[in-house]
């Protein structure tokens, strides 16, 4: 068992306790016609370890979505359980899914997602204006079959107890 520190409720999170629904992220998925550019800009805030995740891998994540000016639009931590995503299968906006590919368990990254890979030309009024780029700070939990404590991002000792 891998422990990530006690969360507010002290409960542990396993894949069976993860949330499989996150209507906030539902949008245009990557497809064969989705151009490679513009690509999300990725900044690793804290390195993870282990093999990078890719298509078909089930992961759990928490994220904070904001506009480039810093206005927070959504924080998945408020739902307390992490979101479970099967990369390449879960109906998730293309830019978010592309930001997950290559992450390593325990990693935290900031992904600046251009509007064509977010909610496109129309945006998602009233919260997300048309042609809005989005910024996600993503905490990648270990693959879904590994036990982690509830409510806290993965702990990476080398990162010195990082937080957003």
Image (spheres, rainbow, N blue to C red):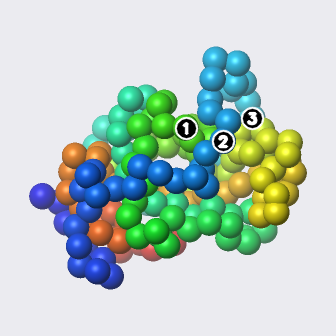
Q: Nearer the viewer, residue 35 or 14?
A: 14
Say whether residue 40 is left or right of residue 158: right
**Alpha-carbon span between mark 2 and mark 1:** 7 Å
Q: Residues within 10 Å of mark 2 (few under 14, many from 20)?
A: some
Residue matched to label 2: 27
Residue matched to label 3: 38
Q: Quadrant of the N terminus?
A: bottom left
| Residue 161 locus on image (x, y percent) | 35, 74
Identity of the residue drawn at 70% across and 24% down: 34
Which callout, 1 or 3, points at the residue further toward the start of the chain? 3
Say whether residue 94 is left or right of residue 9: right
Secondary element under disc 3, as helix, strand or loop, is loop
**Alpha-carbon span between mark 1 and mark 3:** 20 Å
Above or below, 65 relative to 85: below
Question: Tags 2 and 3 in contact by the CB under 8 Å rule?
Answer: no
Question: Tags 2 and 1 in contact by the CB under 8 Å rule?
Answer: yes
Asked if one can make out residue 85 in the rendered structure from this viewpoint, the answer is yes
Say whether residue 131 is left or right of residue 67: right
Secondary element under disc 2, as helix, strand or loop, is loop
- Quadrant of the rendered structure where residue 65 is? bottom right
Secondary element under disc 1, as helix, strand or loop, is loop
Residue matched to label 1: 91
- Quadrant of the rendered structure where residue 30 is? top right
Q: Nearer the viewer, residue 12 or 50?
A: 12
Question: Tags 1 and 3 in contact by the CB under 8 Å rule?
Answer: no
Identity of the residue drawn at 57% across and 41% down: 92
**Alpha-carbon span between mark 2 and mark 3:** 17 Å
Residue mark closest to the camera, 2 vs 3? 2
Asked if one can make out residue 4 in the rendered structure from this viewpoint, the answer is no
Identity of the residue drawn at 47% across and 31% down: 89
């Amino acid at each position: 068992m891998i422990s990530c520190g006690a969360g507010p409720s002290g409960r542990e999170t396993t894949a069976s306790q993860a949330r499989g629904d996150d209507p906030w992220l539902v949008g245009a998925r990557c497809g064969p016609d989705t151009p490679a550019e513009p690509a999300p800009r990725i900044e690793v805030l804290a390195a993870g370890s282990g093999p990078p995740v890719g298509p078909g891998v089930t992961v759990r994540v928490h994220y904070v979505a904001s506009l480039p000016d810093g206005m927070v639009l959504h924080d998945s931590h408020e739902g307390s359980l992490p979101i479970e995503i099967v990369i390449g299968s879960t109906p998730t906006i293309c830019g978010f899914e592309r930001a997950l590919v290559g992450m390593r368990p325990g990693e935290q990254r900031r992904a600046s997602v251009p509007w064509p890979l977010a909610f496109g030309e129309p945006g998602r009024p009233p919260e997300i204006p048309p042609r809005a780029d989005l910024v996600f700070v993503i905490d990648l939990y270990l693959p879904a079959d590994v036990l982690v404590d509830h409510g806290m991002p993965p702990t990476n000792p080398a990162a010195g107890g990082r937080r957003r």
